[in-house]
Image (spheres, rainbow, N blue to C red):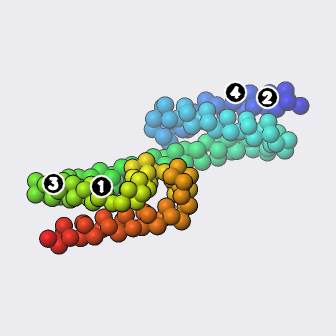
């Protein structure tokens, strides 16, 4: 039975492969994409035929193969369109951020960063350890607790207090 299915797939490829490729070339307007889409379509069809006994009785294999191919084409171009859109948003956002950077803002940012670093270093020792493990090493609360021999609730409390202290210092800096 498996040999019979392989023969069906080979026959379909010989019958429809070239025409499918030409159709994909026209639709994709890119021979490399057309080749990949055609191959992917036949691979999916082959997997379906090998897995599903009823697939060998497909009444219109050409329509079935073309439908699989056009779905693949649609998925590929929809994904590319979405990626292009996201890239354009990112590029526009980055350019806006760059345009907003002025020498004055850069100096203020460096000053604020130094003040925040100083605030972190003046935290009580345990708070400072917890905060740095959380923010700089990105450890989960549970892991920080194990590492320092404290409960997860205590870890959360230390982080909340550290953040409050840092916010207070930043507020003072911004207020003036």
Dot 3: what SS?
helix
Is disc 2 surrounded by few (<14), some (14 to 19) or many (20+) residues within 10 Å?
Answer: some
The correct choice, above or below, for 61 with respect to 85 in the image is above
Q: Position of residue 138 (x, y in %)?
A: 45, 51
According to the image, label 4 marks what residue? 14
Q: Along the horizontal axis of the image, is 16 left or right of 104? A: right
Image quadrant for the N terminus?
top right
Sequence-wise, the earlier of marks 1 and 3 is 3
Tell me whether the residue at label 3 lies in contact with that at label 2, contact meaning CB atoms closer than 8 angstroms. no
Cα distance, mark 1 to mark 3? Answer: 23 Å
**Residue 83 visible in the current orientation:** no
> What residue is shown at x 25% (from left), y 56% (from top)?
118
Dot 4: what SS?
helix
What number is the disc on residue 75?
A: none
Tell me whether the residue at label 2 lies in contact with that at label 4, contact meaning CB atoms closer than 8 angstroms. no
What number is the disc on residue 106?
A: 3
Badge nearest the viewer, 1 or 3: 1
> What residue is shown at x 46% (from left), y 67% (from top)?
157
Sequence-wise, the earlier of marks 1 and 2 is 2
Q: Along the horizontal axis of the image, is 59 left or right of 102? A: right
Is disc 1 surrounded by few (<14), some (14 to 19) or many (20+) residues within 10 Å?
Answer: some
Dot 2: what SS?
helix
Badge nearest the viewer, 1 or 4: 1
Q: Position of residue 174 (x, y in %)?
A: 19, 69
Sequence-wise, the earlier of marks 3 and 2 is 2
Cα distance, mark 1 to mark 4? Answer: 72 Å
According to the image, label 2 marks what residue? 6
Cα distance, mark 2 to mark 4? Answer: 12 Å
Q: Position of residue 25 (x, y in %)?
A: 50, 36
Cα distance, mark 3 to mark 4? Answer: 65 Å
According to the image, label 1 marks what residue? 121
**Residue 132 visible in the current orientation:** yes
């Amino acid at each position: 039975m498996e040999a019979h299915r392989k023969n069906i797939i080979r026959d379909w490829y010989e019958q429809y492969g070239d025409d499918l490729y030409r159709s994909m070339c026209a639709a994709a307007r890119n021979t490399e994409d057309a080749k990949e889409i055609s191959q992917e379509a036949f691979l999916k069809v082959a997997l379906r035929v090998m897995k599903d006994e009823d697939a060998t009785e497909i009444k219109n294999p050409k329509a079935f193969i073309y439908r699989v191919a056009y779905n693949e084409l649609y998925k590929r171009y929809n994904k590319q369109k979405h990626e292009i859109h996201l890239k354009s948003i990112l590029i526009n956002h980055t350019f806006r951020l760059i345009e907003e950077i002025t020498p004055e803002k850069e100096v203020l940012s460096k000053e604020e960063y130094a003040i925040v670093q100083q605030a972190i270093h003046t935290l009580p020792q345990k708070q400072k350890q917890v905060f740095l493990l959380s923010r700089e090493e990105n450890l989960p609360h549970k892991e920080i607790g194990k590492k320092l021999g404290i409960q997860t609730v205590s870890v959360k409390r230390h982080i909340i207090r550290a953040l409050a202290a840092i916010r207070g210092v930043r507020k003072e800096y911004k207020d003036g």
